[in-house]
């Protein structure tokens, strides 16, 4: 009997686990659960005897992949797969997949929620500002970026986007103004919402020069990855520009420096919370389970990321 392990340091909602269990057991497989583990070795041990692995931001490094002697497939229930060692997966003939789009609305709602929170001065009782009429730049117009644009339109924001992989006509047809360069996006937009993946090209790519271009009362919104920010550069911007604010879904490495000097100008979630809704857990978790069954039963490899 095939064994499917859900390994989630940040567990799915129970309703999602129940749904995954049904799909897995209906296929005649066994479901195993490793939740809220604190030691990476627990994952290394748990993977030893399983055929398939479902993870979130959990680290599927070479150690995990090589420990999985029977492992054939890892599905990252979510979008970003920077937590999977793709080279190790390929070398060990393990298929790696993600579930694009399934948790995007949840992430987009958090981005807008944090923006309202900051615009109203963290709900501290003082007079804030409104989002209506302000300019929002979407840095990468993928699944999350699109939802952010849709919701922001409801707030009456003017929306621009930069994405070299999406054609200008598509953006225009969705009411979004395409801009030709990253520099232009940051120069024109008071709010910028980041939706780029973390990879060797993007890590530390958002820094001093770019952020200093943003207009007065700038606010950078990061529901992507903390790794894409050059934190030293951002702190330099904070020191030079008292009008600059930063929102991040997960605390930056240098959070102590923000806490010490810049209270009221930032908000960080204590854990990555963007996809932490029942709906997102159900969408992404069930998609992961279906992809695993489809892979074993029908050889389907849609959404494979290590081709
Ligand atoms: C993603 O890449 O899908 C999001 O960052 C969500 O990550 P999570 O599943 O760890 O919450």
Image: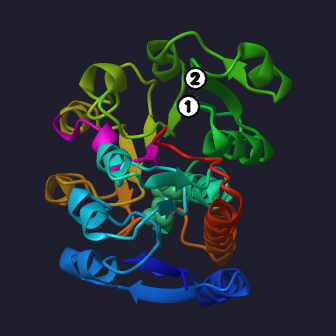
Q: In this view, does 160 lie to the left or right of 210?
A: right
Residue at label 2? 163
Residue 232 locus on image (x, y percent): 16, 37
Residue at label 1? 140
- The answer to which image quadrant residue 9 occupies is bottom left
Q: Can residue 126 be seen in this view?
A: no
Residue 209 locus on image (x, y percent): 28, 19
Query: Which residue shows up at 78% across the image and 22% down it?
Result: 170
Q: Can residue 25 be seen in this view?
A: yes
Q: What element carries label 1?
A: loop
Q: What stretch is highlighted in magenta?
A: 221-232
Residue toward you, 55 or 67: 67
Query: Which residue shows up at 46% across the image and 79% down it?
Result: 5
Q: What element carries label 2?
A: loop
Question: Among all residues in the image, which is located at the extreme right?
Answer: 173
**Badge 1 or badge 2: first in the primary sequence:** 1
Q: In which quarter of the image is the N terminus?
A: bottom right
Q: Is mark 1 within 8 Å of ligand 1?
A: no
């Amino acid at each position: 009997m095939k064994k499917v392990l859900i390994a989630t340091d940040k567990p799915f909602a129970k309703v999602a686990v129940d749904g995954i269990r049904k799909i897995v057991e209906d296929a005649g497989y066994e479901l195993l659960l490793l939740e809220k583990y604190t030691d990476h070795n627990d994952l290394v041990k748990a993977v030893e005897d399983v055929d398939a692995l479902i993870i979130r931001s959990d680290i599927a490094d070479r150690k995990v992949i090589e420990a999985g002697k029977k492992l054939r497939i890892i599905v990252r229930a979510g979008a970003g797969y920077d937590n999977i060692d793709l080279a190790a997966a390929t070398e060990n003939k393990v298929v790696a997949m993600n579930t694009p789009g399934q948790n995007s609305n949840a992430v987009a709602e958090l981005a807008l929620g944090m923006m309202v929170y900051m615009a109203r001065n963290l709900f501290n009782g003082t007079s804030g500002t409104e989002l209506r009429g302000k300019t929002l730049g979407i840095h990468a117009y993928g699944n999350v970026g699109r939802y952010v644009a849709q919701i922001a339109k409801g707030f009456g924001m003017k929306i621009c986007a930069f994405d070299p992989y999406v054609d200008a006509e598509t953006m225009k047809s969705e009411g979004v103004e395409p801009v030709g360069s990253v520099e232009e996006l940051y120069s024109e937009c008071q709010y910028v919402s980041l939706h780029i993946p973390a990879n060797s090209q993007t890590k530390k790519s958002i820094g001093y020069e770019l952020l200093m271009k943003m207009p007065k009362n700038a606010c950078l919104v990061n529901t992507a990855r903390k790794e894409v920010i050059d934190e030293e550069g951002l702190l330099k911007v904070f020191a030079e520009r008292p009008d600059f604010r930063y929102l991040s879904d997960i605390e930056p490495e240098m959070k102590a420096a923000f806490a010490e000097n810049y209270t009221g100008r930032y908000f960080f979630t204590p854990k990555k919370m963007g996809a932490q809704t029942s709906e997102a857990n159900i969408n992404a978790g069930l998609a992961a389970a279906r992809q695993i069954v489809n892979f074993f039963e029908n050889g389907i490899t849609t959404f494979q990321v290590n081709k």
